[in-house]
Amino acid sequence: MPPSGQELLDQSIAACKEVAEGLGDQNKDWETSVAEIVENFGEVSGTFFFKTMPSIPAARTAVKDATALLELKNQGDWSGFAPALEQMIKTAQNVIDKAGMKGTTLT
């Protein structure tokens, strides 16, 4: 059985938490952005949207982007990290919007 939207969101949260760990040593703003993503994903976690099929594509993209961000961090590829973080912020915003929290804006 394929993972549910909630399971995918949980994977994204776990990857983002790992990305955020110690990231402030490299760039405090990056750490703040990733922490905001984790916080906002935590707020939408468990909502009805993640029990539905439409959540799966958005949540799957979030896992892909969060995993890519984690790989870049682990490789110390900071020049690639910045644009990947921008992409993760866009993806996270999309997930949050789809989950019905349109008033939330990530920085």
Image (tube, grey):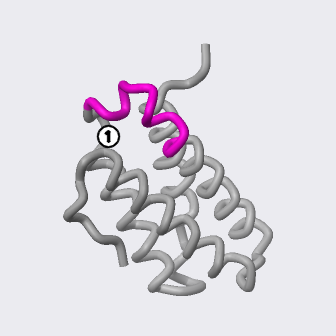
Up-down: is 45 above or below 92? above
Please name the residue shown 63% across and 81% down the image: 82
Q: Quadrant of residue 73?
A: bottom right
Closer to the camera, 72 or 92? 92
Q: Quadrant of the C terminus?
A: bottom left
Q: How many marks?
A: 1
What secondary structure is marked by label 1? loop
Closer to the camera, 42 or 97? 97
Predominant SS of the magenta segment: helix
Up-down: is 95 above or below 19? above
Q: Where is residue 95? Give x, y as percent.
A: 41, 51
Left or right? Give the position of 76 relative to 101: right
Q: Which residues are magenta?
A: 48-59
- The residue labelled by disc 1 is 45
Q: Where is residue 79? Give x, y as percent.
A: 74, 85
Please name the residue shown 35% across and 72% down the image: 106
Q: Tag 1: Cα neighbours inside 10 Å, few (<14), some, or many (≥20)?
A: many
Q: Quadrant of the N terminus?
A: top right
The amino acid at mark 1 is: Ser
Q: Where is residue 40? Give x, y as percent.
A: 31, 57
Up-down: is 43 above or below 21? above
Please name the residue shown 40% across and 76% down the image: 32
Residue 65 colored in magenta in the image: no
Q: Where is residue 100? Give x, y as percent.
A: 25, 48
Residue that protrudes farthest toward the left in the picture: 103
Please name the residue shown 38% across and 26% down the image: 52
Residue that protrudes farthest toward the top in the picture: 1
